[in-house]
Amino acid sequence: MNDIDQIIDQVSDYLRYKAECGERVVEVEREALVALRAGVGAAVAAPTHLKSQISNLTESNSVPPSTLPPLNTSTPRPPDLPTSRPPDLPTSRPPDLPTSRPPDLQTLAAIAAECEACRACGLVDGRNKVVPGQGCADSPPIMFIGEAPGADEDAQGLAFVGRAGQLLTKMIAAMGYTRDEVFIANICKCRPPGNRTPTPQEMAACIPFLKRQVAIVRPRFIVALGNTAILGLLGETGILRIHGKWRQFEGIPLMPTMHPAYLLRNPSAKRACWEDLKLVMAKLKG
Ligand code: SF4
């Protein structure tokens, strides 16, 4: 491409840009017009429509040369296009995305920590490990609730891990679940000395922890294990009288039945206990 071709292209671009901006008159210096006219005359290859465009420039040249701005031969850019980059998009992650454990587990862990620090009743003085309870924290089918930890639970910090706990594991398996699929807890989180029955005052001091656990875990059904459990949860006595009869605790259907420790001492009661558990299973399937 020779010099005149470049000039013609640049002028053509400039005129198109001005036309797109709505302008119909372009002012140029007289000397530039003379040079362009001479150049166009010599450029036999220039397209006819460009010759016409350039010729029209002379007809609009009515401004004295001294007041005309010089013709800018570089390709102009539209004046108001944004030149800076858009504001930087945020690169940091949202501040409140969970980074570790799910909130429910964090809350259960917080309750366990509160139990660890609790001195609301005298049971704290005789215990080794606090036993907050464990299992599925996300709406398990069943939450089993006993009265208080025994020696094995006190040593390990886990609910229902002694002989009675092993029988409970079999009962859970017979219902079609594993221990990890249910939640297991006691009303009192500390072991009473000599495995004695916790007093109503000790259960009343500790039961707020259990109520908070029930609210977090949201089990579909509760199975209350034994006489002391129904006293602490329902204020009722006589498990052999009310077992198999539906009750409620914190708005959740509750089935009272015999404690596994009682079943170990009275194996003949296992059948009645199994009938109670079958009522829960029927509700779970329904
Ligand atoms: S049994 Fe419950 S209320 Fe009593 S000290 Fe232990 S955690 Fe606290």
Image (tube, rainbow, N blue to C red):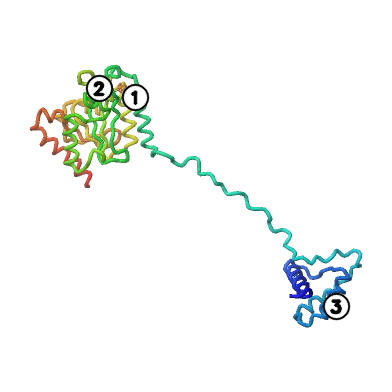
Task: Looking at the picture, tell me which residue is in the foreground, 27 or 11.
Answer: 11
Amino acid type, label 2: Arg
| Ligand 1 visible in quadrant | top left
Q: Position of residue 135 (x, y in %)?
A: 28, 36
Instruction: Provide the residue designation for mark 1.
Output: 116
Per the image, the residue denoted by label 2 is 191
Q: Is 33 placed left or right of 175 in the picture?
A: right
Q: Would you say the beta carbon of the disc 1 residue lies within 8 angstroms of ligand 1?
A: no
Q: How far, Cα to Cα, is label 3 from label 1? A: 100 Å
- Asked which quadrant contains residue 132, the reply is top left
Q: CA–CA distance between discs 1 and 2?
A: 13 Å
Residue that extends furthest to the front in the rendered view of this protein = 2
Of the two numbered discs 2 and 3 in the rendering, the one whose residue sits closer to the viewer: 3
Gap in angstroms between the C-alphas marked 2 and 3: 111 Å
Q: According to the image, label 3 marks what residue? A: 38
Among the two numbered marks 3 and 1 on one chain, the one whose residue lies closer to the N terminus: 3
Residue at position x 33%, y 35% in the image: 215
- Observer able to see residue 235: no
Name the residue: 22% across, 40% down: 178
Q: Nearer the viewer, residue 127 or 111?
A: 127
Numbered disc 2: secondary structure: loop
- The amino acid type found where label 1 is placed reads Glu
Secondary structure at badge 3 equals helix
